[in-house]
Image (cartoon, rainbow, N blue to C red):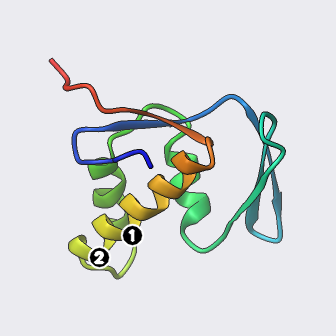
């Protein structure tokens, strides 16, 4: 499993097709043929990672928009991004930024 920490940068891969059905985003990984459905706050996060983004930026945005504590948001975002990484739907860059 890919480790995602506060210094990582994540971005959606180009190897998937997405569609929205009743507010849920459905992703198809063209390489693996596997589907992933995103609901709840998942589509919001997916939109945020269309450009390279640090998880801490996602957490800050979610804390500002939703009634959620920062620690819980950070844990949930980390697990969510790790799931996307395991499904090869995002690229993770853990190199330190200069």
On screen, residue 97 versus residue 18, left or right, reads left
Residue sticking out furthest to the front: 1
Q: Is residue 87 positioned above or below 94 on the image? A: below
The image position of residue 68, as x and y in percent, is 32, 79
Pointer 1: what residue?
76
Residue lying at 39% horizontally and 69% vertically, measured from the top left: 76
**73 displayed left or right of 39:** left
Q: Nearer the viewer, residue 62 or 12?
A: 12
Disc 1 to disc 2, C-alpha distance: 6 Å
Residue beneath the point at 28% across and 58% down: 60
The count of marks equals 2
- Residue at 35% x, 82% y: name it: 67
Disc 2 element: helix
Residue at 22% over, 73% down: 71
Give the numbered dot on residue 72: 2
Determine which quarter of the picture holds residue 63.
bottom left
Check the image and report above or below for 17 versus 55: above
Q: Establish if 88 lies above or below 67.
A: above
Q: Residues within 10 Å of mark 1 (few under 14, many from 20)?
A: few
Q: Nearer the viewer, residue 33 or 27?
A: 33
Residue 95 position, x and y percent, is 26, 25
Contact? badges 1 and 2 (CB < 8 Å): yes
Question: Quadrant of the image for the C terminus?
Answer: top left
- Taking the image as shown, residue 85 lies to the left or right of residue 93, namely right
Q: Secondary structure at mark 1?
A: helix
Considering every residue shown, the one lying at the far top of the view is 98
């Amino acid at each position: 499993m890919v480790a995602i920490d506060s210094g990582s940068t994540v971005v959606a891969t180009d190897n998937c097709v997405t569609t929205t059905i009743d507010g849920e985003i459905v992703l198809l990984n063209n390489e693996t043929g596997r589907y992933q459905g995103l609901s709840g706050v998942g589509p919001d996060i997916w939109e945020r990672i269309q450009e390279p983004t640090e998880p801490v930026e996602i957490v800050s945005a979610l804390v500002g928009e939703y009634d959620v504590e920062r620690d819980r948001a950070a844990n949930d975002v980390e697990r969510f991004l790790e799931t996307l990484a395991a499904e090869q739907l995002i690229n993770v860059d853990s190199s330190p930024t200069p």
